[in-house]
Image (spheres, rainbow, N blue to C red):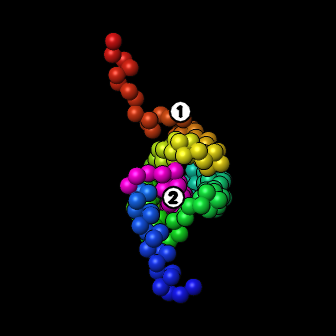
Amino acid sequence: MSEEAIEARYQAEVKQADTDHHTPTAGAMTGHILANLQVNNVKLHQASWFLDGFAAEALQPLYTELISAGRKNFDALAKVLLDENELPPSTSAEYGSYAMLEEDGRNKYRGNTELVDITAHDYATQNMFIDRAIALADKENRPAMAAFLTDLRGQNNQAIRRLQAVLGKTAWEGLVEEDDDDDED
């Protein structure tokens, strides 16, 4: 393929991605999820490397499991996008642009409780995008995408519950805002 043809295809991709992200589609929202998985991989490694004391040894198996699941889901979700005739983000710049999760080099100096809490919050943030993508996939009649994302949501829920248990909390304690309107009569 000529350089001109490559450039034309790439520019068409960039234009379509911009359109999709301004009027969200299941594919665009799933691209955000993929980017979040990439950033989450970095953050999980960071946390596992800088846990200290007895907690480090106790939590290493959990973080190793979360890293492994995240890598597997990253690869599988990219294939789901390709199966749906969508282009997954494929550069560090795209991951940085599409991810909602934020890296912070300061985290290596935080205590174990903060690291675990940050990890739980990151999974909750990912769930917001997953929920939107599931709704869009259902609306767009993409059942295979919706099924994969629904399973991913379940895996995230389990990760949240386990991380919150380490902190002595219930699954959603401190992660979901309480609706004060429910108490008013």
Disc sitting over residue 31 in the figure: 2
Q: Is residue 141 visible?
A: yes
- Outermost residue toward the top? 185
What is the count of numbered marks? 2
Q: What's the magenta region?
A: 22-39
Query: Is residue 37 one of those drawn in magenta?
Result: yes
x and y percentages locating residue 146 in the rendered image:
60, 45
- Outermost residue toward the bottom? 2
Say which of 10 and 118 sits in front.
Answer: 10
What quarter of the picture does the N terminus occupy?
A: bottom right
Q: Secondary structure at mark 1?
A: loop
Disc sitting over residue 82 in the figure: none
The residue shown at (41%, 67%) is 15
**Crowding near the residue tagged with mark 1, few <14, some 14–19, many ≥20 C-alpha atoms within 10 Å:** some
Separation of residues labelled 1 and 2 (CA atoms): 30 Å
Disc sitting over residue 170 in the figure: 1
What quarter of the picture does the C terminus occupy?
A: top left
* Dominant secondary structure (helix, strand or loop) of the stretch shown in magenta: helix
The residue shown at (55%, 64%) is 87
x and y percentages locating residue 77 in the rendered image:
61, 57
Single out the mark in the foreground, 1 or 2. 2
The residue shown at (51%, 65%) is 89
The residue shown at (55%, 63%) is 88
Q: Is residue 11 left or right of residue 142?
A: left
Q: Secondary structure at mark 2?
A: helix
N-terminal label among 1 and 2: 2
x and y percentages locating residue 54 in the rendered image:
59, 51
**Crowding near the residue tagged with mark 2, few <14, some 14–19, many ≥20 C-alpha atoms within 10 Å:** many
* Residue type, mark 1 in image: Thr
* Residue type, mark 2 in image: Gly
Query: Is residue 129 one of those drawn in magenta?
Result: no
Q: Is residue 124 above or below residue 184?
A: below
